[in-house]
Image: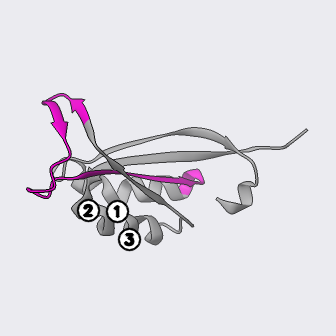
Amino acid sequence: MIETVTRKRIEILADAALIKRVTTAIDAAGITGWTVTPVQSGKGRDGYWREERVTGSDKVFILTIAPEDKAMKLAEDLAPILTSHRLLLTMWDVQVIRGERF
């Protein structure tokens, strides 16, 4: 049977202009990797929104997987800008194979 380990999957929805800020925080937390994916549209508490290249409000999902201690360090680092920069940060437990890579 394949063995798995529990890690935290972290997804951050942010304006594209914040990619460097968020990925720098990920690196500073000692997390080994991340992925950035463009987001085209969505709906939230304030209604619908769509990608808007003219005004520079493109959105991205930044995904990373980390041990709980590093995930919490990242969350603490980003906490001060969650509201001011309208970030959405979610995390939950996932089972991964080759846990030493995360």
Q: Is residue 69 left or right of residue 74?
A: right
Q: Is residue 27 left or right of residue 38?
A: right
Q: Is residue 36 left or right of residue 2?
A: left
The numbered disc on residue 18 is 2
How far apart in space, not on screen, are marks 3 and 2 (Cα)?
Answer: 10 Å
Please name the amino acid that badge 1 sits on. Answer: Val
The numbered disc on residue 24 is 3
Against 44, residue 75 (above or below) is below
Which residue carries the number 1 mark? 22
Which of 49/89 is in front? Answer: 49
Please name the amino acid that badge 2 sits on. Answer: Leu
How far apart in space, not on screen, are marks 2 and 1 (Cα)?
Answer: 6 Å
Task: Label 1: state its secondary structure.
Answer: helix
Question: CB under 8 Å between callouts 2 and 1?
Answer: yes
Q: What residue do we see at 53% from left, 59% from top?
A: 70
Task: Label 3: state its secondary structure.
Answer: helix
Other residues around mark 2 within 10 Å, as few (<14) / some (14–19) / many (≥20): some
| Magenta residues (range) | 42-69
Against 50, residue 57 (above or below) is below
Tag count: 3
How far apart in space, not on screen, are marks 3 and 1 (Cα)?
Answer: 5 Å
Other residues around mark 1 within 10 Å, as few (<14) / some (14–19) / many (≥20): many
Please name the amino acid that badge 3 sits on. Answer: Thr
Quadrant (top left, top right, bottom left, bottom right) of the C terminus: bottom right
Question: CB under 8 Å between callouts 3 and 1?
Answer: yes
Residue 6: image x %, image y %?
Answer: 67, 43
Indicate the quadrant where residue 33 lies: bottom right
Q: What residue do we see at 44% from left, 71% from top?
A: 28
Mark 3 against mark 2, which lies toward the viewer?
2
Q: What residue do we see at 57% from left, 55% from top?
A: 66
Residue 90: image x %, image y %?
Answer: 41, 41
Say which label, 3 or 2, has the lower sequence index: 2
